[in-house]
Image: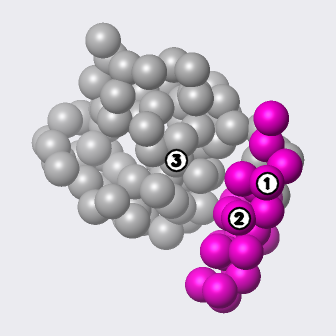
Amino acid sequence: MKSLAEKIREQRKKQGYTLQELADKSNCSKSYLWEIENSKLLRPSGIKLGNIAEVLGVTVDFLVSDNRLNAEVTEQENFLVSKFRQLSAKRKQQVLKFIDIIKD
């Protein structure tokens, strides 16, 4: 099982990002990412971990667990998440109810 540090480093390199580029895109400092990738920071902030996962196109679940089923997030899924985050709480509930209605 790969560690959080290994997964972030592997996904960062797969995307072709330097530490600085990932830091800029994920609103983290380069030193913060370095500490994560070198296992110096064992419990990173959930918000920052979410930002990192979003930039890398993976889920937080993928980063913190050994479940590879949800590893890759498509551009379409990222688009939906981005739009969903912009909705009010009431609209989010409506969308979730709609999804429950139309899912197979």
Q: CA distance from mark 1 to mark 3?
A: 29 Å
Q: Is 24 left, or right, of 98 in this rendering?
A: left
Q: Residue 36: percent from the left, percent from the top?
A: 27, 44
In this view, the residue farthest toward the top is 1
User: In this view of the protein, which residue sits in the foreground, 83 or 51?
Assistant: 83
Amino acid type assigned to the residue bearing label 3 in the image: Ala
Amino acid type assigned to the residue bearing label 2 in the image: Lys
In this view, the residue farthest toward the front is 101
Residue 23 among magenta residues? no
96 is higher (above) or lower (below) than 78: below
User: In this view of the protein, which residue sits in the foreground, 35 or 71?
Assistant: 71
Q: Is residue 78 visible?
A: no
Give whichever of discs 2 and 3 has the lower sequence position.
Answer: 3
Magenta stretch in the rendered image: 80-104
Pointer 3: what residue?
53
Name the quadrant containing residue 92.
bottom right
Amino acid type assigned to the residue bearing label 1 in the image: Ile
Query: Mark 1 and 2 residues: CB-CB less than 8 Å, in contact?
Result: yes
Q: Nearer the viewer, mark 1 or mark 3?
A: 1
User: In this view of the protein, which residue sits in the foreground, 97 or 25?
Assistant: 97
Pointer 2: what residue?
97
Q: CA distance from mark 2 to mark 3?
A: 26 Å
Q: Residue 10: percent from the left, percent from the top?
A: 49, 24
Which residue is painted at 71% across and 64% down in the image?
97
Name the quadrant containing residue 42.
top left
Give whichever of discs 1 and 3 has the lower sequence position.
Answer: 3
Pointer 1: what residue?
101
Q: Is residue 93 visible?
A: yes
Q: CA distance from mark 1 to mark 2?
A: 6 Å
